[in-house]
Amino acid sequence: MLTLGKTLAHAAQDKPDKGNGLGKAILLVARPGLGDPFFKESVVLMFPPSVKIEDDLIVGLIVNKPTHVTLGDVFPEEKALKDRTDTTYFGGPVEPRVPGVVFRSSKADKPAVQLFEDVYVSFDLDDMKGRLKGQEKTPDLRLFVGRAQWAPAQLQNEMNLGAWYGLPVDASLVFNTNPQYLWHKLYDRAEHAPVAELLNKPFEFAASPRLQ
């Protein structure tokens, strides 16, 4: 049984803050030299700054790592969900017991917030449960546990060390039916995006060991 930790009450959608890291949703594709085991061969959906979880942090979800944890493991107390065997995805190493859902919709009411185009995210437990119970209405919906996050200087440093490629985001990639092959697919096509295109302002480098 997976015991939920602190639940994120909401991800508030404000006007974009151009000094708050990434300017829009993109995909980060880990390069082979990235030694962190949590991010090895990862594809990360990076949230735009309009999506607030914690101030002054850049946040994303790893989208290509299905787990052996089922939907029923995450919500064992919910009669309608406890027997569901839907795959849960590892979103990142921060608060790995806290769930969130990413889904496609023509519109979404709060507390869900828009990431890009028709793709939304929600960390509200009641909202998640309602969407999961009525999933036939939202077939493109995935449950994640945990998230990835960086201080702006930390991500800036990793980009300058050559840890990541940046690629435009597309819903078909986020909801790819063969996520185990997604990293290889994107790595083959990736071209290193200049840091200036990914970050809205320069940051001082954070201390970090050089990639192996």
Image (spheres, grey):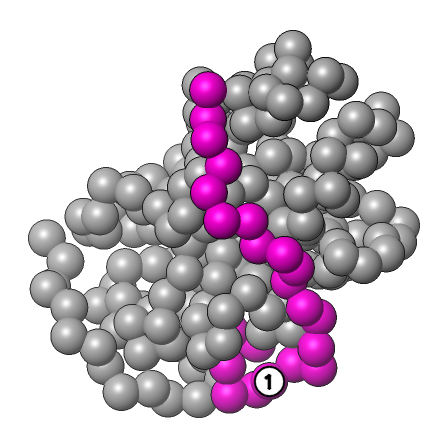
Three-letter amino acid code at the position of disc 1: Asp
Residue 121 pos. (x, y %) = 68, 51
Secondary structure that dominates the magenta span: loop
Side (left or right) of 211 relative to 166: left
Depth check: 179 or 82 in front? 82
Quadrant of res 85: top right
- From the viewer's perspective, is residue 36 above or below residue 201? above
Determine which residue is flagged by label 1.
Answer: 17
For image coordinates 49% across by 37% down, the residue present is 4
For image coordinates 27% across by 87% down, the residue present is 204
Indicate yes or no whether the magenta region holds residue 34: no
Q: Which residues are magenta?
A: 1-24
Counting other residues with Cα less than 10 Å from the Cα at mark 1, is it few (<14), some (14-19), or many (20 or more)? some
Residue 144 pos. (x, y %) = 54, 38
Side (left or right) of 30 relative to 90: left
Identify the element where label 1 is drawn. loop
